[in-house]
Image (spheres, helix red, strand yellow):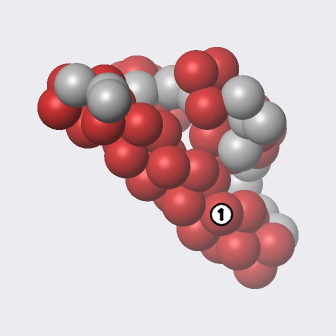
Amino acid sequence: MASCAAQRQAVARIEVRAFGCLLEELLARCKEGPLLPLHSLRDACLAEAPASRPSFETIIAALEGIQR
């Protein structure tokens, strides 16, 4: 049986994928601005292997970097 920490990490990776799906929908509606960094972030969030997906800490840092 998986530990609580492992279960939390697995759920977080699923939530990251859900964020990637949301980002994909938003990007489909945006036609302006520098979107390449957001496309890269979306692709990372939608990685097939859950362990390859970024953490939310990494996502936040990426979004803050894009904002500047």
Q: Position of residue 19 (x, y in %)?
A: 51, 57
Q: Left or right of 26: which side holds 61?
A: left
Residue at 70%, 73% in the rendered image: 25
- Foreground pick, 4 / 11: 4
Residue at 62%, 40% in the rendered image: 45
Q: Left or right of 66: which side holds 8?
A: left
- Foreground pick, 52 / 56: 52
Q: Secondary structure at mark 1?
A: helix
- Foreground pick, 48 / 41: 48
Residue at 26%, 37% in the rendered image: 8
Under mark 1, the amino acid is: Cys
Q: Position of residue 2 (x, y in %)?
A: 32, 28
For label 1, the residue is 21
Residue 30 occupies which quadrant of the picture? bottom right
Compared to residue 30, the image places residue 14 above or below, namely above
| Marker count (numbered) | 1
| Residue 60 in sight from this viewpoint | no
Image quadrant occupied by the C terminus: top left
Q: Position of residue 20 (x, y in %)?
A: 62, 53
Q: Position of residue 13 (x, y in %)?
A: 47, 39
Check disc 1: other Cα within 10 Å, few if <14, some if 14-19, many if 20+: some
